[in-house]
Amino acid sequence: MSQVLPGDAAPVYDLIGIGFGPSNVAMSIAVSEHNARVGRQEPVTAHFFEQQPSFGWHRGMLIDDATMQVSFLKDLVTLRNPTSEFSFLCYLQSKGRLIDFINHKNLFPLRVEFHDYFEWAAAKVDDMVSYGHEVVGVTQVVRDGAVEYLDVTVRSGEGLVVHRARNLVIGSGLRPQMPEGVERGDRVWHNSELLKKVDGLEGTSPSRFVVVGAGQSAAENVAYLHRRFPEAEICAVFSRYGYSPADDSAFANRIFDPEAVDQYFAAPEDIKSRLMGYHGNTNYSVVDIDLIDDLYREMYREKVLGTERLRFLNVSRLVDVKETPDKARATVKSLVTGEESFLDADVVVFATGYGPADPVGLLGEVADRCLRDDEGRVRVERDYRVATDPDLRCGIYLQGGTEHTHGITSSLLSNTAIRVGEILDSLLDRGVKSASGAARQVVDGTGSTAR
């Protein structure tokens, strides 16, 4: 615990952000636009720290023909501020593609294009972010028995630096998930690293890939590998009869509306569970119907021609994988007969999804002040602020890890623009006050603090 001595009044940030993915890019834009409106009257001082050396969002899955699953209007700003200069339409105008995009008559841009939009937006607020800086811990600063500030320790090439804040916004993203007992290796991949790993196969002639999973990423992996390696067999393994289509119908999509967050938050726990059960097929383990049709059409064409390279091992699951220097052996079990078969492959790709990082994992003893529900989950208020004991006066806001309280849009782009506006409003309503400059304490190798 860091103890503040009488008269010690280090300047602090109003807000420090952990991570700089799309959610915290949107947060920085909201702060920037607020400061532009208020001028020097009540600006919010904010800074964000990102471990990556530059902006990157699922780079390993930027397949050249993959499209977004959300409308371009659900960008970083439009639902909060339709006139923002940070919108996707302004990005298109700056790139000279606005008319071309309109003529395309499509709500869903290429994923590589939307990533470029994110990079463009992040570059416009790059004075608010430090790349190559990893947040390694948070400690509490106590005055008169109450936690008044949070000290954020950041590691970079310069060593350890401590920054002081009145509030935190944690947007540390999702973590790739592998089945229990399966470790990634040279021939066992998670789909999050697909493109980077595939480049390492240049100059070789793979004969077989196995792709595990039944969601959008799995289907995209199958299609991409089938196209990229025209001599290889692609085996898709999943427990269903086939890929399930995503429900993107107009009424079902209302689960992503801002008003749906209010309703979900207020609903009893049993109703929350039912809502997730009803509408999980809008996002989880489902595939765009056009891609399903394309894969089936290609499978059938190959059967007609007698050149089958697409194999779908349905109603099955992969129960074991063993890696050797020259292959990976996958054991696939039929869920109907129990029979096991073996597939020797050059690579096994697990498109098995992502899970949220522990939202308070970096908080150390501060986490002990965060309240939990009956199932041990962090309690989160409607404004995305973690519920804490009353002696913690700082706000800790979450962008992600709130599905149990706020519903399906917790870590999705659909509600990002609205969410960051609500967080900023909460922060302002709580009466944060800016101070000139920011606390910066350099920590030497012994762990002592040099001011």
Image (cartoon, rainbow, N blue to C red):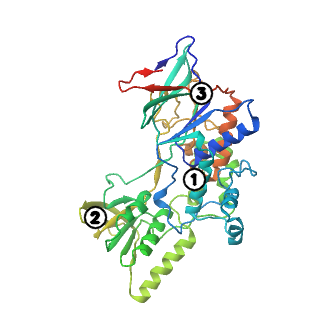
Mark 2 or 1: in front is: 1
Amino acid carrying mark 3 in the image: Arg
Q: Residues within 10 Å of mark 2 (few under 14, many from 20)?
A: many
Of 43 and 149, the residue lying toward us: 43
> Would you name the residue on which mark 2 appears?
328
Where 407 sits versus 49, above or below?
Answer: below
Mark toward the viewer: 3 or 1: 1
Residue 71 position within the rendered picture, expressed as x and y whole percent measured from the top left: 65, 60
Category of crowding for the residue at label 3, using alpha-carbon neighbours closer than 10 angstroms: few (below 14), some (14–19), many (at least 20): many
Q: Are the residues at dot 2 and dot 1 in contact (C-beta closer than 8 Å)?
A: no
The reply, left or right, for residue 368 in relation to residue 17 is: left
Identify the residue at horizontal 33%, vertical 65% (top origin). Answer: 347
Place residue 98 in its image quadrant.
Answer: bottom right
Indicate the position of residue 367 as horizontal and vertical percent values. 48, 30
Q: Give the residue at x 46% y 52%.
A: 354
Q: Is residue 159 visible to us here?
A: yes
